[in-house]
């Protein structure tokens, strides 16, 4: 629905903390050339003061979005500039995570109550970079859950130059529910996201939350511009293999699970050769669900769980696990 030529988010994989690391994203890119991938949320503090390689990625991962957690406009702009210089395609501001740790850092979903601050972050980041700056939010927080609350948030932040909002169609309870409960308990309200698109037709609006099938995805795309799926892709990653044909209308042949195994086995060997206590399990932990529904899937999962963590395990551990499977 979006007329913006750069918009490619008809399908994206949600940023998932501890899950969508560079190994996971490399695996996903093998299955879909077009689906937009997001990093795990990285905080401004980690980027500016941390000693780890928080912004590292594989070149094959593009199109790739950095999800940034923070609320200080200067720090956000500094991190945006660094990410842009490293070749990220977009930067997304986390205004949706409800965890206590995030709230204590004054970012995530609690920022929905401070739209002027989010707008200032967008302004400063856009001054620092030429790539798109986007926002991922909820539909509300705590008792601030009216349509008017969301409407005002979108209005104020979009005025600063944000042209794409990813909206998780649940509100977040900032106290009383765990992050896991906040992904399930507050009821979904897709209609509210559709209404935002009607009211702000010039904006690109993506929807997130509880979406599991391509039938649901294509129905949502009748109303909004993009669909973001997280846990379903992680639990059943081979679903991604159909995204290019079903969502982006390509006609490429589906990559087989066997082809994925061969490529990922080579990737594991390359990862281990890089040293730094690298293990096969750093990669295979993201692949446990790829054979779900096939004969031998349980043995595949068990073999990887029992053997990939060994310091001696190489890419061959993946090939041996796959021998249990009838594709």
Image: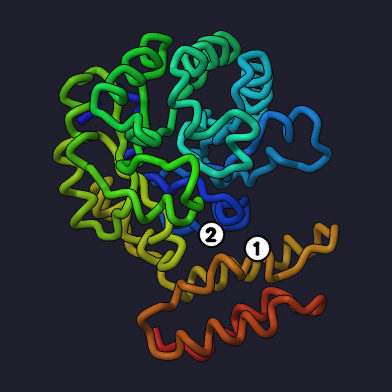
- Write down the quadrant of residue 39 in the picture: top right
The CA distance from mark 1 to mark 2 is: 9 Å
Disc 1 secondary structure class: helix
Residue 281, located in which quarter of the rendered image? bottom right
Q: Is residue 92 visible?
A: no
Q: Is residue 186 above or below residue 164?
A: below
Q: Position of residue 297 (x, y in %)?
A: 45, 85
Percent coordinates x, y for residue 93 in the rendering: 51, 29
Tell me residue 289's x, y (percent): 47, 73
What residue do we see at 35% from left, 54% from top?
185
Q: Is residue 121 left or right of residue 115?
A: right
> How many neighbours does mark 2 have within 10 angstroms: few (below 14), some (14-19), or many (20 or more)?
many
268 up-or-down from 132: above or below? below
Q: Which mark, by number, is residue 27?
A: 2
**What is the quadrant of residue 225 in the picture?**
top left
Where is residue 130 shown, x and y percent of the image?
A: 52, 15
Disc 1 and disc 2 in contact, CB within 8 angstroms:
yes
If the image is split into quadrants, where does the C terminus sit?
A: bottom left
Query: In this image, 317 relative to 198: left or right?
Result: right
Q: Nearer the viewer, residue 232 or 321?
A: 232
Q: In what element is the residue under mark 2? A: helix
Q: Which residue is mark 1?
A: 267
Kindly tell me whether residue 202 is visible in this rendering.
Answer: yes
In terms of depth relative to the viewer, which is nearer, 72 or 291? 72
């Amino acid at each position: 629905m979006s007329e913006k030529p750069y918009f490619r988010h008809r399908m994206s994989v949600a940023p998932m903390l501890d899950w969508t690391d560079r190994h996971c994203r490399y695996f996903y890119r093998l299955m879909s050339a077009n689906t937009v991938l997001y990093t795990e949320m990285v905080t401004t503090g980690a980027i500016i003061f941390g000693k780890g390689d928080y912004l590292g990625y594989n070149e094959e991962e593009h199109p790739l979005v950095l999800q940034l957690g923070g609320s200080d406009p200067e720090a956000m702009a500094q991190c945006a500039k660094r990410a842009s210089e490293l070749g990220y395609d977009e930067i997304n501001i986390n205004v949706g995570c409800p965890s206590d740790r995030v709230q204590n850092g004054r970012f995530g979903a609690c920022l929905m109550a401070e739209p002027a601050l989010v707008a200032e972050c967008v302004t400063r980041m856009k001054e620092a970079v030429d790539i798109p700056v986007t926002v991922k939010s909820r539909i509300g927080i705590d008792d601030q859950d009216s349509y008017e609350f969301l409407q005002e948030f979108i209005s104020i932040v979009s005025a600063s130059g944000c042209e794409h909002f990813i909206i998780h169609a649940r509100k977040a309870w900032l106290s009383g529910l765990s992050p896991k409960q906040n992904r399930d308990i507050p009821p979904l309200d897709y209609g509210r996201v559709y209404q935002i698109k009607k009211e702000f037709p010039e904006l690109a609006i993506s929807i997130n939350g509880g979406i599991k099938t391509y039938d649901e995805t294509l129905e949502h795309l009748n109303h909004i511009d993009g669909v973001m799926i997280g846990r379903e892709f992680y639990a059943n990653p081979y679903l991604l293999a159909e995204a290019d044909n079903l969502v982006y209308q390509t006609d490429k042949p589906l990559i087989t699970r066997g082809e994925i195994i061969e490529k990922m086995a080579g990737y594991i060997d390359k990862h281990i050769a890089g040293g730094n206590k690298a293990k096969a399990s750093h990669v295979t932990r993201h692949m446990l669900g790829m054979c779900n529904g096939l004969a031998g899937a349980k043995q595949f999962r068990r073999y990887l769980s029992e053997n990939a963590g060994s310091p001696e395990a190489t890419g061959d551990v993946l090939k041996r696990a796959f021998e249990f499977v009838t594709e």
